[in-house]
Amino acid sequence: MTELYAGIDLHSSNNVIVINDKEGNQVYRKRLRNQLGSVEKALEPFQEDICGIVVESTYNWYWLVDGLMDLGYIVHLANTGAIQKYSGLKHVDDNTDAGWLADMLRLGILPEGYIYPKGERGIRDLLRKRAHLVNQRTSNLLSMKNVVTRNTGSSPRSSALKIISDETIETMFSDVNVALSLKAGAQIVRALTEQITLIEKTALKQVRLRDAYQNLVTVPGIGPVLALTIMLETGDIGRFASDGHYASYCRCVGSAHFSNGKKKGSGNRKNGNRYLGWAFAEAAAFAMRYNQQIQRYYQRRKDSGKHMMSARAAIAHKLANACYYMLRDNTVFDVNKAFR
């Protein structure tokens, strides 16, 4: 049997397949359209000899990874953020990228991403859509607040703007243009709120928190929706070696490079899962409101000269660390351990 290793450089409408043998010699290379049938046909002559296929982790990997796994291939998802470029090459293109993916698998140095279970991707992505709609609603509420503040000098609460009626807006402003601007924003907010509520009800009906994740709702600031988001975005907690790895994945760790006590630069602060970053930021904001011990911790951070957002980020970091141990050990939240 000839050992072969395949790498697929995936793009939005096409992909490049390179197959190398165990010595690193290229035995096949071709650019194909993003159609599973075309990929299957190209790989079929080599199927018995292919030890593994590496697919680049792009935004559109679902169809290809699922399709290849259904065909019986061993598939690896490349963690593009951790891949080191092959040094010494003057010219780099899609062919060399696909070949390098195959070679990293052959050499045993491939940084792998997590292939999220197919059965839960739909509900996870539905909650991601909810987060997207929540951001849009917040943007519209801020725009409405700016209109009111510019014209009245007062700053209304977002909760009041969420339910404001067209009749109330017409009573507040005689200028038809100002009123129309506010009514347009209010209608968008109402429509977004309706869809957000529908998504929440649908998600909570379909999915129940797994046993270990039931403990998440014992954390101040984490309700059913945030707990469900954290559960679905985290997946198997065992894939994280430590609380630091988990907090980093949750974007709760600052990205800075220090030497001799001085900052020498920074890394990619966007590495990690932005939805978990959002979830723990939301949890931190609510936890400060409802837990006195966390409030005192926040105040101490502020009084020590830390910027307000830095203090809030520190709370999010501590909550992420606490959740890691809660999920790993199946325990409830202990504020005395998390915020000493």
Image (cartoon, rainbow, N blue to C red):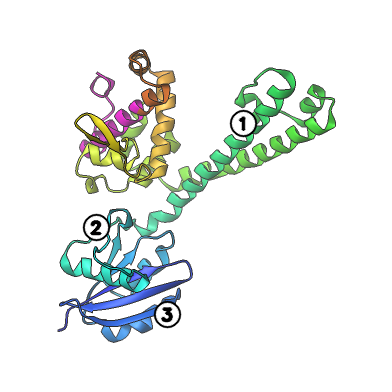
What is the span of residues highlighted in magenta in the rendered image?
314-340
Of marks 3 and 1, which one's residue comes earlier in the chain? 3
Estimate the x, y position of residue 184 in percent, counting from the top left.
73, 38
> Which residue is disc 3 drawn over?
37
Q: Amino acid at mark 1?
A: Leu
Picture coordinates of residue 85 (x, y %)?
A: 27, 61
Q: Check disc 1 and report the residue beneath it.
A: 142
Front residue of this view, candidates 271 and 264: 264
241 relative position to 97: left or right? left
C-alpha separation, residue under disc 3 versus residue under disc 1: 48 Å
Crowding at mark 1 (Cα within 10 Å: few <14, some 14-19, many 20+): some
Q: Residue at x 26, y 58 (%)?
A: 84
Magenta stretch: residue 43 in it?
no
The quadrant where residue 160 appears:
top right
Label 3 close to label 1 by CB (< 8 Å): no
- Residue 326 colored in magenta in the image: yes
Q: Quadrant of the N terminus?
A: bottom left
In the picture of the structure, the residue carrying the numbered disc 2 is 111
